[in-house]
Image: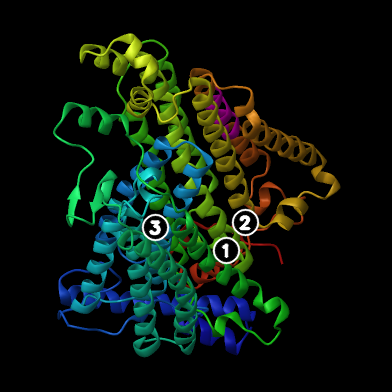
């Protein structure tokens, strides 16, 4: 490579872009040689990019890559996979929260728990994609603390009846405290970057920016913790319906040893004390403040012409992020699979809805990974800062919608369970000695029947809520997939690539696909108002996903962006960085006379862009 550069500079200088790309290839080759030597010396590699021969108490975090350098995908980190296991439980508990309260209030509490928990994952992923903390005791202990805090927070993702009553239950207080501690740990990690990072000056500035963003989040989490603590420790109401007797200084449990006391305790199910939704609202808003800060930084260069984003940020290893985000989506889809499989089986239409749900989730994962790029050069984060921001925001919304969709399938299956067991609680009361007249006239017994059955006793109202959850979450999933796809290429590219008169046929196909997708999203978003039958909902959901998958495959055939020669008449159909990479590869192959390994070796003469 060095001989080639010297020869070209003396005889026929290359364009600066191509020259920079060749230098990046050369640097990557040198780095690979150094890494190989380290691996042989240490007998293998660690969870990151390199192997440390000595286990240290502390090592400085290292910036993974600089602006303009080629990016090398880190080795598989099994600690990340272990970390993700906690999100399997988090997704399941979030689904249980919705199923226990399929209302607007339940949705608020779902989002209030989901976004703070999700932010911990994104904070860790963005850190790991920019820095390598090394194999030292200090950072291992830090990761251990994060896992402990995360696991405790997941444990306290409970139904709305518990989270909304801090005076009687500690759940929201413990959850808020865990979110506060997790954010303080993130601030500490950023301070470590500011003081000790081995990298460019922009890394220190990026660490300072992270401290500011995390501090705003921490203020909201602190407020939620203080409010919930004030309610819980300043109230005379004990846990789960117990009351405190100031006269005897003892706790008098509402469930006594008498039969009447037991009956009243059972009949009072669901009454957990005074509600306070303010802590959950603060948690939700606090998590969103991070996105607001990133939005400001993304568009700062629009009104501050002197601001250079590269001087205040660290480049992300996009290949690593693609890999981790794919694993994250698998976790969300895994919750759907778990929701479908952990349901008591019934006869009749139950199996129709079950198999429709299984096929739908299977096709949905095909649709997702068929829509997302697998190469860093094709990702929205590489295309532009705005495209990357749109991808992150809608990726988060997409993740939440996947959990709600999976839980909706579970609620659909439970409709068959409720239909089968509708009289079970009533039969138990009759067996216990109650007469039909006592059950009909005793309000407490009627409350017990409601508490021991489905979350909403009215079948029609309950199925209406389930239909809204199912249909709207499905529509949001499709909308987010389309927005993510647009973020990778850009709106202008998708609108202009076939503006040429020679692309008239594709113009008609593109318009037809656009109106079909839009109509399908609008239809499903409103379908819950007039269709609530569980089996029909699950069948229409399957048909909708199949149509979406067909549109995606048809679009790939009609608008093939893989090579320039497939659509030479479309002036805007270009591959960007891929064409430059292939040009560099061909020039290097001409000099060395050998085929290059890996992706570079797959380029042919037809891949080289026209002058």
Q: Secondary structure at mark 2?
A: helix
Quadrant hosting residue 337? top left
Badge 2 is on which residue?
487
CB-based contact (under 8 Å), mark 2 and mark 1: yes
Along the horizontal axis of the image, is 113 left or right of 611?
A: left
Q: Position of residue 460 (x, y in %)?
A: 53, 21
Q: Secondary structure at mark 1?
A: helix
Q: Position of residue 449 (x, y in %)?
A: 35, 23
Q: Quadrant of the C terminus?
A: bottom right
- Residue at 59% x, 89% y: name it: 10
Quadrant hosting residue 455? top left
Q: Residues within 10 Å of mark 2 (few under 14, many from 20)?
A: many
> What number of labels is visible?
3
Q: Secondary structure at mark 3?
A: helix
Q: Is residue 552 above or below residue 82?
A: above
Badge 3 is on which residue?
117
Of marks 3 and 1, which one's residue comes earlier in the chain? 3
Along the horizontal axis of the image, is 367 left or right of 253?
A: right
CB-based contact (under 8 Å), mark 3 and mark 1: no
Of marks 2 and 3, which one's residue comes earlier in the chain? 3
Of marks 2 and 1, which one's residue comes earlier in the chain? 1
Badge 1 is on which residue?
388
Q: Is the image coloured rainbow, by chain, by secondary structure, or in one colour?
A: rainbow
Q: Residues within 10 Å of mark 3 (few under 14, many from 20)?
A: many
């Amino acid at each position: 490579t060095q001989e080639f550069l010297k020869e070209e500079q003396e005889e026929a200088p290359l364009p600066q872009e191509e020259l920079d790309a060749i230098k990046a290839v050369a640097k990557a080759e040198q780095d690979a040689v150094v890494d190989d030597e380290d691996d042989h010396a240490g007998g293998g590699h660690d969870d990151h990019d390199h192997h440390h021969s000595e286990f240290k108490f502390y090592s400085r975090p290292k910036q993974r890559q600089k602006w303009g350098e080629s990016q090398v995908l880190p080795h598989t980190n099994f600690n990340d996979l272990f970390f993700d296991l906690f999100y399997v439980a988090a997704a399941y508990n979030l689904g249980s929260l919705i199923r226990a309260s399929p209302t607007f209030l339940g949705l608020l509490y779902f989002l209030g728990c989901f976004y703070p928990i999700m932010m911990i994952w994104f904070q860790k992923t963005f850190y790991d994609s920019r820095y390598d903390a090394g194999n030292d005791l200090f950072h291992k202990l830090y990761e251990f603390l994060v896992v402990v805090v995360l696991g405790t927070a997941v444990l306290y993702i409970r139904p709305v009846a518990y989270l909304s009553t801090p005076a009687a239950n500690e759940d929201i207080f413990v959850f808020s405290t865990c979110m506060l501690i997790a954010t303080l740990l993130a601030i500490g990690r950023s301070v470590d970057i500011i003081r000790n990072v081995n990298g460019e000056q922009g890394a220190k500035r990026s660490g300072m920016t992270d401290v500011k963003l995390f501090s705003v989040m921490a203020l909201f989490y602190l407020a939620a913790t203080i409010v919930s603590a004030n309610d819980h420790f300043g109230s005379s109401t004990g846990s789960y319906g117990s009351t405190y007797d100031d006269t005897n200084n003892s706790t008098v449990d509402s469930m006594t040893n008498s039969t009447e006391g037991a009956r009243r305790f059972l009949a009072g199910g669901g009454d957990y004390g005074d509600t306070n939704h303010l802590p959950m609202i603060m948690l939700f808003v606090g998590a969103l403040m991070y996105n607001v800060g990133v939005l400001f930084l993304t568009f700062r260069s629009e009104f501050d012409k002197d601001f250079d984003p590269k001087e205040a940020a660290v480049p992300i290893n996009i290949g690593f992020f693609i890999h981790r985000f794919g694993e994250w989506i698998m976790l969300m889809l895994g919750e759907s699979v778990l929701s479908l499989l952990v349901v008591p089986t019934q006869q009749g239409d139950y199996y129709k809805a079950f198999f429709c749900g299984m096929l739908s989730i299977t096709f949905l994962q095909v649709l997702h990974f068929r829509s997302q790029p697998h190469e860093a050069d094709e990702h929205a984060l590489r295309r532009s800062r705005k495209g990357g921001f749109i991808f992150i925001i809608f990726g988060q919304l997409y993740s939440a919608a996947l959990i709600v969709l999976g839980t909706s399938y579970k609620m659909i299956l439970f409709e068959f369970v409720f239909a089968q067991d509708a009289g079970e609680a009533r039969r138990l009361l009759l067996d216990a000695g109650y007469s039909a007249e006592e059950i009909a006239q005793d309000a407490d017994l009627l409350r017990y029947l409601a508490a021991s059955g489905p979350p909403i006793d009215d079948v029609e109202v309950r199925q209406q809520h389930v239909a809204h959850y199912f249909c709207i979450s499905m529509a949001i999933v499709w909308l987010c997939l389309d927005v993510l796809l647009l973020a990778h290429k850009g709106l202008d590219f998708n609108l202009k690539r076939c503006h040429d008169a020679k692309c008239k046929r594709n113009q008609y196909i593109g318009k037809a696909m656009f109106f079909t997708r839009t109509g399908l999203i609008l239809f499903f978003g409103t379908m819950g108002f007039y269709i609530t039958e569980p089996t029909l909902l699950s069948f229409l959901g399957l048909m909708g996903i199949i149509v979406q998958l067909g549109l995606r495959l048809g679009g790939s055939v009609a608008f093939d962006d893989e090579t320039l020669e497939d659509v030479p008449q479309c002036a805007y159909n270009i591959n960007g960085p891929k064409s430059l990479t292939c040009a560099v590869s061909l020039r290097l192959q001409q000099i060395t006379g050998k085929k290059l390994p890996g992706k570079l070796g797959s380029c042919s003469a037809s891949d080289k862009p026209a002058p």
